[in-house]
Image (spheres, coloured by chain):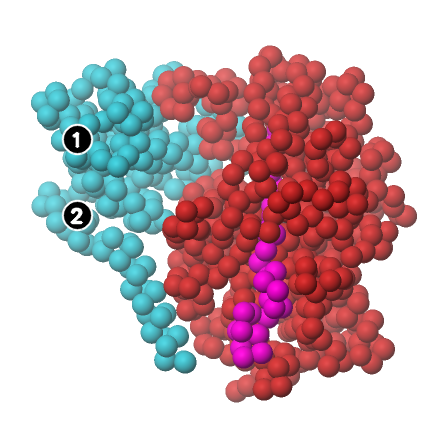
Amino acid sequence: MEKQTKLTRRHFIALSVLGAGGMCLLSRCSNPPLSPWRFITVQESDLLDALVEQIIPTDEWPGGRDAGVTNFIDMQLTGPYTRYQETYRKGLQAIQETCKTKFQKRFEELSFDQQTQFLKSMEAGKMEGKLWEKGFDRQFFRLIRDHSLQGFYGSPRHGGNKNNISYKMMRLDYPVIVGQNRYNN
Amino acid sequence: MGNKHVNAIVVGAGAGGGIVAKELSVAGLSVVLFERGGWATYDDTDTDELKSQRTTPLGNAYGPDDLRYRRVIENTDGSTYTVLPSEGSYNNNAACVGSGTVSYGAMAWRFMQEDFKLKTTYGAIEGSTLADWPFTYEDLEPCYEKAEWEIGVAGDATQNPFGAPRKKPYPMPPFSHNKEAQLLYDAAKRLGYHPFPIPMLRNSIPYGGRPACIRMRTCCGYACPVNAKCGTQNTVIPVAIATGNCELRINSVVSEILVNEQGKITGVTYFDEKNRKQIQTADIVVVSCSATETARLLLNSKSKFFPNGIGNENDWVGRNLQGHAYTGAYGIFEDEVYDDLGPGASVAISDFNHHNPGIMGGGVLCNEFIRMPYSFTGIRPPGSASWGKEHKAFQRLNFKRVAQAVGPYQEIPNFEARVKVDPVVKDFWGIPVVRLSGSRHEKDIEGCKLMSEKAELWLKEAGAIQTWQSLGGGKGISGGQHQAGTCRMGNDPKTSVTDKFGRIHAVPNLFVADGSLNVNNGGFNPALTIMALGFRVGGYIASEWSKGNRFK
Ligand SMILES: Cc1cc2nc3c(=O)[nH]c(=O)nc-3n(C[C@H](O)[C@H](O)[C@H](O)COP(=O)(O)OP(=O)(O)OC[C@H]3O[C@@H](n4cnc5c(N)ncnc54)[C@H](O)[C@@H]3O)c2cc1C
Ligand code: SF4
């Protein structure tokens, strides 16, 4: 009985590690150019910058890129979102490959409006081809959207919302005590 | 070395369990109070919206964690998938000393007289296990009073004409309304409704040796930095420990209830803080793990005497799982209605609890707790963009101009909405996990529509220039923070799991004391009722014990 429980426990741990994507297999160790990021490559970070900027564009206030949303996503991908590593790698690649076939360009080289249209078709599930099968377009779009919004509107401690920018934009004093008006990091 | 035998084991230091532990240890019984989590403090995650107990993309602030816990969800076609505690379909409450009472919104509702006799009030409903409770509101009233005074509630019952009769007022005066609540209060008056301040398990004045609330933006989903929120962790549990009779054993996960060769309950097995399997014996065991986990523990306790799990002879353990269908509406106002006076929710109307033609039950409607920036990204009129320029501008322009009126709609008990244990998936300790299946009663949506319409009209009267409904009650499993009903009380062992004092039928020394007991869940948040049940079960055991009953 005792033995069995132990086995199951080990089995459980083994499973969790697998779920974590086998960190080294997927991460930068297999990508020659050294990346300053934790999980993403330099090229992926350029693409992510463009994507998060689409979700939260710069207007009279900074957008996703300047608020460090890419950093938020990278940070979570080696933390609570380790389970999404594979999805990101696959999804980011699918976006670039589709752009190459369609426009002979990388996503971040498209005009802002072209990028918007591209994401709108992902959102609507209208992407074609094997790369986007089984609703992967919608699924990956939602992931990027939700994670970007978290990075921009969540606590700066997780790597995004640099300088409390979204709180300032929404005119929310921080810390959250009535009568206080301080922005600390 | 073995553990010393005690009079009573209480499993789970939440709303129900904390109170039972206190009642028993004050009465002189030796008690071990088990809690799978640890002590929670505000500093763990403070005001971090992404890791709170209300919005949880990066994890639950106050447990359980994503590393060691799992649940399985069964779809209607029988297929299944595994979920983490940080995912909504896990239907989490919390895991720490005090459990949900550390981070709750702290609304302190008594159910109404009708809620204890729904079947008599509404008649049988097709596809529902609707029943009357085995006792009346009047029987539970003294326990409600104990909960209000020993844990601490601020409110003014005289302003709510629909509230059930009571003997004593609340121990603390009510909170004042913030700007949005005042607008809604005035509008309700104009509509002929009966608005009143929400009773709250928060200190409006210093009480119980703890200070008054400083009215922050973050409260619901967060621990309290000044200890003004009243939970079991800062009231009854310290009292229990101070008696010297109660040992709180944290980071200890109870895995099974032990049955001896004569078929008698003798204690529990558990994994201690170092994950070592241990045994604790006792004369009495009280299970207070919350509706999902209590059912799991009973179902996981299989033996030749209880081949289907303890208390499950008639297949009722885990049945009738219910939470609340949250339903209401949003409104955008021309002027800002947000004045940053937390925690947000402060005005309620009880005009739609019961006596709505064609609808069973109903629910209380309140203005909502302050939504933090990320939560607000999901609040948009139908058809709006969920990203991009327009979405960002809405966030900036309307955060301070949106109010929500919303409430917990009383769900119709459904036998098929249930907790089972999964035959395959196990948690970190190798214990089979909860498997949730079934769905809400299909009629819930009708009551939700009615309430959402009322909420919309209320917001319009308050001055909203644009409104839309946030309709609850759709298909799917309901449990979560308000989980209840899985070990229902009753007089007939064939259609219930425990008797009217929470004792498992046919087992003399095993009790349940948490939301599992609720026969139905009221049109109100359930914590105060669960606390009252804790006083009822704990008080019963203590008084019997003092008369010499050893529950053999
Ligand atoms: C964000 C939030 C807001 C809320 N707002 C309100 C509100 O405004 N008003 C209201 O009335 N209610 C509110 N609630 C709900 C309220 O907290 C619950 O209804 C209440 O805590 C349930 O009581 P319980 O005794 O059934 O279970 P719990 O209080 O959940 O207690 C169960 C305890 O058992 C422990 N446990 C479980 N299994 C084991 C095991 N195997 N071994 C050891 N320990 C175990 C758990 O860790 C937990 O501490 C809120 C909850 C949350 C999370
Ligand atoms: S609003 Fe009051 S009760 Fe709630 S956490 Fe802040 S101080 Fe505590």
**Mark 2 sits near ligand 1, with its Cβ under 8 Å away:** no
Quarter of the image where the N terminus of chain A is located? bottom left
Q: Earlier in the sequence, mark 2 or mark 1?
A: 2
Q: Which chain is cyan?
A: A
SS of the residue under disc 1: loop
Q: Which callout, 2 or 1, points to the residue nearer the camera? A: 1
Q: Marks 2/1: CA distance?
A: 28 Å
Which residue lies under the disc numbered 1? A129
Segment tinted magenta in the rendering = B302-328
Q: Colour of chain B?
A: red
- Placement of B396 over or under B254, stated as above or below: above
Quarter of the image where the C terminus of chain A is located? top left
Instruction: Name the spot of residue B197 as percent of width and height, x first.
Output: 76, 33
Tell me which residue sits at (70%, 26%) in the image: B181
Q: Amino acid at mark 2?
A: Arg
Left or right, A30 with respect to A89, comes to left
Instruction: Name the spot of residue B6 as percent of width and height, x first.
Output: 67, 80
Which residue lies under the disc numbered 2? A28
Q: Amino acid at mark 1?
A: Gly
